[in-house]
Amino acid sequence: MLNKALEIKIEHNAYVCQSCRISLSEDIDHNNSNVNGTGNGNGNGTAKIKLIIGSGNVFHPNARLTIIPPPPNNSTNDNDSTNDNDAEITVRIGSNNLFEEESHCILDLSHMNIHILQNKNNNDNDDNDDNDIDNDDNADEERIHTAMGSYNQLSAGAQLKCTSIGNANIFHPKCNVSASASASASASESAPVIQNGNIFQACFHNGTDNGDNNGDASVPVMYQEKVCFLSGESLNFEHEPPVRKIRNHTNGVQRNIREVSLLLNAAKRVVQKHHRLMA
């Protein structure tokens, strides 16, 4: 379940099937054979990733979660002596998310600064010796990168590539959405491209990593309570390419939470009864 560079912590009441695939990889195209957290990551020049899977999450059989770590030596400070091999980054999946069969969530941290993630509060702690306990607690919390909020659903065959997303987003079957941070942005400080309460309909794809849909001005850079879908007489566009459209999703967060909650209750019963779970 583990390798040298990836540690997985599953919180109480999370249901993770043994047949799902959780891996750490710098090259996901050559990492399709990783099973149960075994990946190409070997710790050589790469930070150790600690993945926390929050309570209430459900990973169906053959669901995939891949983490692309920050590259080594990605510091902008030439005097930074931190050894990347000694760095440890904590990545958290929130609570009550649903990962269905053959879905693939790629957490792309490749544009993030490894030293900001690990040591962002060290200077503050050095200057406040009288408050060491409080500072240590705050530093631990701030060093956790929350890659996914709560009540998100990845349906069967859905693919998502992101640095982080918010809450209550629904990805329908076979959609392919990329929302990674751009190389020019500070991924540790910028808001997620996919925020809260969105629906990405079946087979929808947004085209680019930064959510601008190949320059289509009708598609917002930040997704917040939107429904994204393909428009056409059928999904077999033989003569014309599909038209990608977006409309507002009023009260999308509340509506999506209700829908995902119903599915989670059923999914928990099924995986508990019929599948072996990771400890």
Image (cartoon, rainbow, N blue to C red):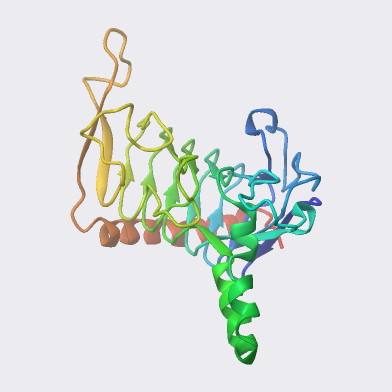
Image coords of residue 213 (percent x, y): 32, 30
Residue positioned 64% across, 62% down in the render: 118
Q: Residue furthest front?
A: 79
The residue sitting at 58% across, 76% down in the picture is 124
The location of residue 153, given as percent across then percent down, is 43, 50
Of residues 49 and 31, the one drawn nearer to the viewer in this rendering: 49
Q: Residue furthest top?
A: 239
- Viewed as shown, does residue 136 lie left or right of 151? right
In the image, taking residue 196 as reference, residue 78 lies left or right, namely right
- Residue 91 picture location, percent across and down: 60, 59
Location of residue 50 (image quadrant): bottom right
User: Which residue is found at the position 30% from the left and 47% from the top?
Assistant: 223
Q: Looking at this view, is 218 or 96 the one in front?
A: 218
User: Residue 265 at x, y = what percent?
Assistant: 45, 62
Vertical arrangement, residue 145 with respect to residue 139, above or below: above
Q: Residue at x 50, y 40 (%)?
A: 183
